Amino acid sequence: MKRVKLFPKIFLYTLGIMLFIIVISHGLIYLLAPRMWFEFGGSRDVTDNVVVSINQEKFVAEAVGKALPVSVGCSLLISIVCSLLFSKMIADPVKKISASTEQMMKLDRGAGCFVHTEEEIGLLAQNVNKLYSGLLSTIEHLEREKDAVRNMERAKVDFLRAASHELKTPVTALNATLENMILGVGKYQDYAACLPECKEMVEQLSGMIHEILETSKLNLTAEPPKSVDVSELLAELCEPYQLIAAAHQITFSLDLPKQLPATLSVGPFSKVVSNILANAVAYTEAGNVVSVYMNGRSFVVENECDPIPVDEIRRLFEPFYRPDFSRSRESGGNGLGLYIVDTLLTSMDIPYSFAPMKSPLGMRFTIQL
């Protein structure tokens, strides 16, 4: 069965009610009017009375019969006009809401129910708009979460690939050394000299595995932020690196305000600062300066060294990446320090920058608190 649209349905329903009222009212008038009695009285003079009587039923019936078509026609015309106006007034807002919801089904961000009335239909339009706005907001949030999860999974895969590649080299070297010792090839016959080398390789592997496991846990446990005095925390974190700097004849300059409250995840932030300070001290030669200070709400670590090329800086935050000028693990570390810094600062939504300095020559790491 074909569906009837709202406007003709309301129109026919309203017109039917009005026609029913017209038929009933005119039928009652036609049936009851002739039975109503009335008299016409007149006088010729004081003494003579003249009484005129007529057939009232016939008279009224004829009068009603003549007026009835005109009355029915006018009533019908008025009924049609009123039904049209009433149907349009009811159907138009509903049609607008229906058209708007069709656009909303296509997730058109410009869609909306533009019905401005005070009754329930206007309230319905407002509720639909609020519902659609909430739906779009939820979709955007889910899209951001999906992108974040996708990026996180991609980063984990890349990290595992890099970790397997890094572990492959020392494992291969250790295996080759042990095979040569078993076969008694050349210098490998001297077990007393080779075993310390093997132990050193095993310790190196153990350290790398420990760092890899610690790095893989970075996004698994989230520490809730709490209020902390940044100056006190930074002073405590700088103490061991001041001793290391002094041992290597490096000037360690520390300038912190007396008090600087902030809300931070203390554990991750401490690990970030420790890695930055360790890099700063490790890549500063004797006689140069490492400066740690606060610039407003910015935590700054500067170290005098040969500036890193700009095209290398972004790659420094990749796992296990060591630039050409520091490829060895003895001088260049394991390549996880800045990767950990980037991961933790990103998870805490703390902006940072790492850029070369021109005067004096060196590198500057800035964290916006």
Image: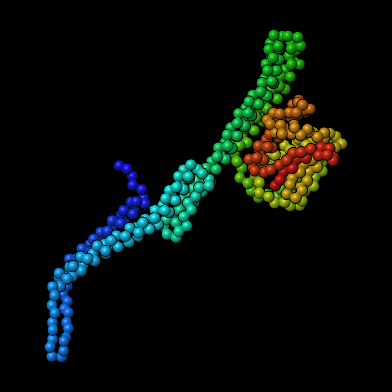
For this orientation, the residue located farthest to the bottom is 46
Asked if residue 255 can be seen in this view, the reply is yes
**Residue 262 or residue 100, whichever sits in front:** 100
Q: Position of residue 312 (x, y in %)?
A: 75, 31
Q: Nearer the viewer, residue 278 or 11?
A: 11
Residue 256 position, x and y percent, is: 77, 48
Report the residue at 87% width, 36% height from top: 287
Rendered position, 277 above or below 123: above
| Left or right position of 286 against 345 | right
Is 241 located above or below residue 335 in the figure?
Answer: below
Residue at 51% from the left image edge and 44% from the top image edge:
108
Place of residue 236 in the rendered image (x, y in percent of width and height, measured from the top left):
74, 44
Q: Quadrant of residue 187?
A: top right
Locate residue 285: give its quadrant. Answer: top right
**Which residue is nearer to you in this view: 247 or 323?**
323
Decide: is 157 above or below 299: above
In the image, 200: left or right of 116? Answer: right
**Quadrant assignment for the N terminus:** top left
